[in-house]
Amino acid sequence: MKNQDQKTFLVTGGASGIGASLAKLIVEAGNRVIIADINLPGAQDVASGIGPGATALQLDICSEAQWEKVLDQVWSEFGGLDVLVNNAAIVHTGYARDVSMAKHEHTMNTNFFGPVKGMLAVLPRFKTQGHGHLATVCSMTGLLPFPGIASYAAAKHALRAFHIGLALEERHTPLKFTIVHPTSTETPMLEKEAEDDAMALSFAGTPVTPEFVAKVILDSIENNVMEAFAPPERGEVVKDLGFNPEKLWELMDRNAAIGAEKLAARRAAKAAANT
């Protein structure tokens, strides 16, 4: 039986990375979590490791029908949902000219339209029950694009605009909205980025851990923060550079060189660890 203070969360992309770390924190805080992922075995492994407070469900976020099916099951089994965390995302790395149109479209469909479908599917249910919190895991690249993931940054930029636009539309309702922008994070996605020279700029800074980002997300939800950055101190710099293309242009070559050096060192360390 659910106690009065316990909340039910649904986290997409919970089979690994930030989503898996967030699911663990949610349960440790006394809540319960539905780990939704297209990779059901992975989600089940994470849920099993967390314990009875976690449940795994399969969800392709690009499918409106699957969104409705999962939400029907959540309402049936748990009596409703308190927080939806749209976290799932994919990346296709490479210079835009070298990435196929099919991959650009896959990025937009997954990273933008997938979360949008989730928000629009849960919105009427939240309004009917009289409460609900929509949390979006976006990215600093949504404000600060750079080479190697142009369509990823474009999708995240669009996602931020939609999230905030929807929040403004619902400002006179009891619904809550939180969006969080992580920097480069040590996840399977970052490992994929490390294989592509076009992604050197991703490594100019120091990546954070998924556990760190998960804590920022959960704290932001609990404190009803509208927009947050992980780490918080990078927020002002990201906003300043992201909306100042001349300044960004000036810094690009220097930061790309720093990133390339750090990426080479990362690859060398990984190769040494594997020998």
Image (cartoon, rainbow, N blue to C red):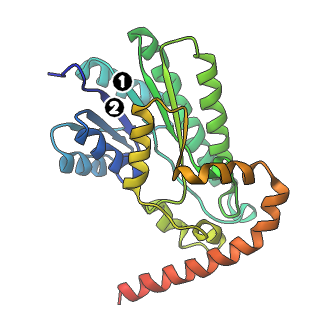
Q: Which mark is residue 27?
A: none
Q: Which residue is mark 1?
A: 82
Q: In the rendered structure, which amino acid carries the disc numbered 1? A: Asp
Helix, strand or loop at label 1? It is: loop
Q: Which residue sits at x=57%, y=11%? A: 172
Q: Is residue 274 above or below residue 22?
A: below
Q: Which residue is mark 2?
A: 9
Horizontally, residue 1 falls left or right of residue 132, namely: left
Q: In the rendered structure, which amino acid carries the disc numbered 2? A: Phe
The reply to whether residue 148 is visible in this rendering is yes
Q: Which residue sits at x=36%, y=24%? A: 82
Q: Give the Cα distance between marks 2 and 1.
A: 6 Å
Q: Is residue 165 above or below residue 44?
A: above
Horizontally, residue 147 falls left or right of residue 120, namely: right
Contact (Cβ within 8 Å) of mark 2 with mark 1: yes
Residue 234 locus on image (x, y percent)? 59, 54
